[in-house]
Amino acid sequence: MATETGTGRQSSGQVSTTAPGETLSVYDGIVMVVGIVIGIGIFATAPLVAQFAGNEFNFLMVWLLGGLLTLIGALCYAEIATVYPSAGGEYHFLSRAYGRPLALLFAWARGTVIQTGAIALVAFVYGDYANAVIPLGASGSAIHAAIAVAVFTGINMLGTLQGKITQHIFTALDVGAIVLLIVAGLVVSLSTGGPTTASTPAATDGSGYGMIGAAMVLVLLTFGGWNEAAYLSAELKDARRNMVKVLTISIVFITAIYFLAGWSYLAALGFEGLKSANAAAADVSRVAFGDTGAKILAVMVCGAAISTLNATIFTGARVFYALGRDLPNLSFFGVWSERGENPANAFLLQGGIALALVGLGALTRDGVKAMVEYTSPVFWFFMLLVAISLFVFRRRDPDSGHAGGFRVPLYPVTPAIFVAICAWMLYSSLAFFGWASLVGVAVLAAGLPLLLLDRRAADVRT
């Protein structure tokens, strides 16, 4: 069983010999995953999902289907992560399955597109809400976003303990915002008997069903982030037994929360009202509790965004740490801080790139949309490769899970479904998103010279 990242070189002249310890409990892991996934998505995507779903019944069912498909992917990740636990997560999996060059390309993509783009995206969502509460002018959203990235990067640099405590606090706000949304829907339902504009659950015309695929793209995006648990595998206590618990409990909980939130939207606004809403969650709270309730929910959405932001910063820097351990020229980032029990230098690099992307997004009319387009194709390309890697590992080492590791049920059907999901999402990201998706692909391609530099370094070493 692998317990370290990359090739595992431990030259004392290259990197610190201090490695991550098993400091995270099952509860810590669940809080991290829930905090990453239940962030800003459910507050932003529900009206769009309704537009594609066709009717109320379809709208509610796609959230359950999204949870099922996400659980399938999580089970596949659980097997890989428990057999090959590492703070490098997907970087480590790709390295073992396909070799060092592809893993290095992923590290480049994650550092410059996937993770840092996600940090900038969530920061912009936070900035939009925070600017409504504390206006800072025309560029207020970007200013709030930059401040949030800097502050929470600094908090995580202080230490893993500080990062965990912060995550617990803001995940509570995160879930609290959803609970308030659900309670608001219940209040409206009990006081009025339900929305007067609600549609029936009967099927609409064929074109409505033809749009279910587009609705699922948005739903799976809203479930996105669960794979970040892979980066906790080296720090999770008894990861072989506990990783599947973390993922399964988290996703079942998230699915239930999303379903209830969807019901709340329908109960307060009706299907047609939801489709046309610009700020659906605030509208639900306003119907139930008035303007004060809408403002309270807006503040809590800020907390939800911070929850996602903090957890994404916490897990994201681990890949820079893994890369630093494999490349002598980047060994500065492969140092594990004994004082903070974290990759402090990697946090600095990640924060700098994320701030640069915030600056880039500030130049566009919609920073959130630009970051979604920028990250999606590259993200789904590498997730597709990770999904395929399970077949590679099973063929290479068919007995790998017999020593106590988790084995995905119904193999090979389960991972085959996961592969199909990833391929579909990759196609959709390229087919339906705008110019920023091509920019993300171009930045990925710009990392190819990194492979040449690594090959030259390997030649020097030999």
Image (cartoon, helix red, strand yellow):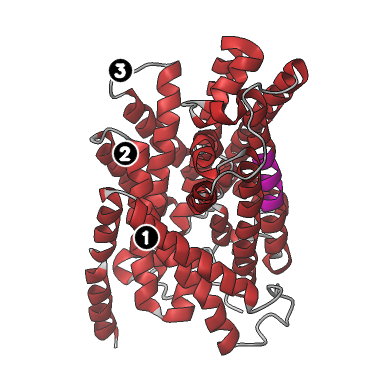
Identified by mark 1, the residue type is Val
Horizontal arrangement in the rendering, residue 263 relative to residue 433 (left or right) = right
Residue 340 seen anywhere in this rendered image of the structure: no
Which quadrant does the N terminus fall into? bottom right
Identified by mark 2, the residue type is Val
Residue for point 38% across, 78% down: 100
Q: Does the magenta stretch include residue 256?
A: yes
The mark that comes first in sequence, 3 or 1, is: 3
Boundaries of the magenta span: 250-259
Overall secondary structure of the magenta stretch? helix
Instruction: Specify the label residue 358 is tagged with.
Output: 2
Q: Does the magenta stretch include residue 319?
A: no
Placement of 364 over or under 218, stated as above or below: above
The mark that comes first in sequence, 1 or 2, is: 2
Which one is nearer the viewer's eye here, 36 or 385? Answer: 385
Q: Name the residue under label 3.
A: 137
Instruction: Specify the label residue 378 is tagged with.
Output: 1
Q: Rounded to the nearest whole Å, what is the CA distance between mark 3 and mark 2?
A: 16 Å
Residue 334, picture quadrant: bottom left
Q: Viewer-nearest of labels 1 and 2? A: 1
Residue 148, picture quadrant: top left
Placement of 111 over or under 399, stated as above or below: above
Q: Position of residue 206 (x, y in %)?
A: 53, 50
Which one is nearer the viewer's eye here, 160 or 396? Answer: 396
Q: Is mark 1 on a helix, strand or loop?
A: helix
Q: Rounded to the nearest whole Å, what is the CA distance between mark 3 and mark 1?
A: 33 Å
Within 10 Å of disc 2 (Cα), the crowding (few <14, some 14-19, many 20+) is: many
Within 10 Å of disc 1 (Cα), the crowding (few <14, some 14-19, many 20+) is: many
Identified by mark 3, the residue type is Gly
